């Protein structure tokens, strides 16, 4: 509900322009690289992009001949994506959808992609979202998340990070920076293994933002073929 309220009207219309910068470009490069490598692995494939937002990756889908469906909780963001799709001449399916409830999409796509949503979710919702993405994708998940790395989590730094997170909450900031360990556990619980990753940026508070290429694994731990 908060995301619906956050991304409407002018916020949706100006979303891309207000975020253009080094981080945005690094995300674009990472996603384009992983989509291309997936193309080399699978050949043609289907993909669900949630949240599709304004359709920032539609040009890549057209270029790589990906059959994409875009889901979002915001109708205004979907409208912006529709304009972009029309300008590109790309026939994407755009639908309202919630990442915490993708039951009707189970097994419906080769790949699921989720960028710039995970840190709106608390730890429990993050784990649930990964389960839903894994259930929806037959083979791969591309997922962006910001974490506090465990290897750099000394006691003084952990205290500073806790204080920063506490301050965020007191100010009503809904963004959550996750513990790396909890994210890795959530990957495993959803039956996903890291195939590759691309670091996007480092935060002043010691956080690390990366885009992961995840592969579904069998119960014995081996990758699908």
Image (tube, helix red, strand yellow):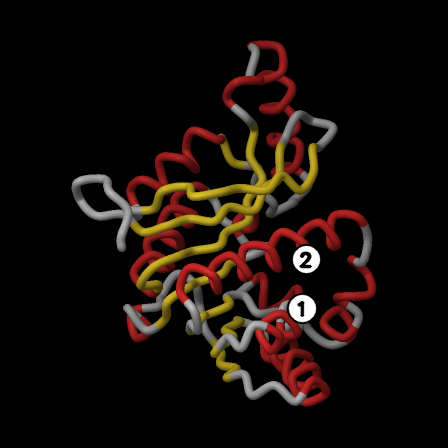
Which residue in the rendered view is the most extreme toward the left? 220
What whole-number distance in Å separates the C-alpha atoms at marks 2 and 1? Answer: 8 Å
Tell me the residue at 72%/72% (across/down): 12
- Quadrant of the image containing the C terminus: bottom left
Q: In the image, is residue 128 above or below residue 93?
A: above
Q: Which of the 4 image quadrants contains residue 60?
A: bottom right
Tell me the residue at 42%/72% (across/down): 45
Q: In the image, is residue 142 above or below residue 104?
A: above
Q: In the image, is residue 113 above or below residue 145?
A: below
Q: Position of residue 201 (x, y in %)?
A: 69, 38
Foreground residue among 119 and 92: 92
Tell me the SS state at disc 1: loop
Tell me the SS state at disc 2: helix
Tell me the residue at 56%/88% (across/down): 91
Nearest to the eye among marks 2 and 1: give it.
Answer: 2
Q: Earlier in the sequence, mark 2 or mark 1?
A: 2
Foreground residue among 117 and 134: 134
Q: Using a 10 Å C-alpha cutoff, classify the residue at mark 2 as few (fewer than 14 neighbours), some (14 to 19) or many (20 or more).
A: some
Using residue 174 as the reference point, say whether residue 83 is left or right of it: right
The numbered mark at residue 112 is none
Tell me the residue at 29%/61% (across/down): 135
Which residue in the rendered view is the most extreme toward the top? 155
Q: Position of residue 222 (x, y in %)?
A: 24, 42
Q: Using a 10 Å C-alpha cutoff, classify the residue at mark 1 as few (fewer than 14 neighbours), some (14 to 19) or many (20 or more).
A: some
Question: Does the residue at mark 2 contact the one at mark 1 (Cβ under 8 Å)?
Answer: yes
Using residue 149 as the reference point, say whether residue 19 is left or right of it: right
Q: Position of residue 195 (x, y in %)?
A: 43, 43
Residue for badge 1: 56
Residue for badge 2: 28
């Amino acid at each position: 509900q908060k995301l619906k309220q956050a991304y409407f009207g002018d916020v949706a219309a100006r979303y891309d322009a207000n975020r253009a910068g080094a981080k945005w470009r690094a995300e674009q490069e990472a996603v384009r690289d992983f989509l291309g490598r997936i193309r080399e692995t699978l050949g043609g494939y289907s993909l669900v992009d949630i949240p599709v937002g304004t359709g920032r990756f539609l040009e890549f889908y057209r270029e790589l001949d990906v059959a994409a469906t875009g889901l979002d909780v915001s109708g205004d963001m979907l409208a912006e994506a529709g304009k972009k799709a029309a300008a590109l001449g790309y026939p994407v399916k755009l639908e309202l959808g919630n990442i915490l409830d993708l039951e009707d999409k189970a097994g419906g796509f080769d790949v699921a992609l989720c960028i710039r949503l995970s840190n709106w979710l608390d730890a429990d919702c993050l784990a649930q979202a990964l389960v839903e993405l894994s259930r929806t994708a037959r083979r791969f998940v591309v997922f962006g998340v910001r974490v506090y790395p465990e290897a750099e989590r000394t006691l003084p730094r952990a205290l500073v990070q806790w204080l920063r997170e506490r301050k965020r909450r007191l100010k009503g900031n809904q963004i959550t920076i996750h513990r790396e360990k909890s994210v890795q556990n959530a990957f495993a619980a959803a039956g996903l293994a890291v195939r590759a990753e691309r670091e996007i940026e480092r935060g002043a508070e010691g956080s690390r933002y990366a885009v992961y290429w995840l592969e579904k694994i069998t119960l014995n731990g081996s990758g699908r073929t």
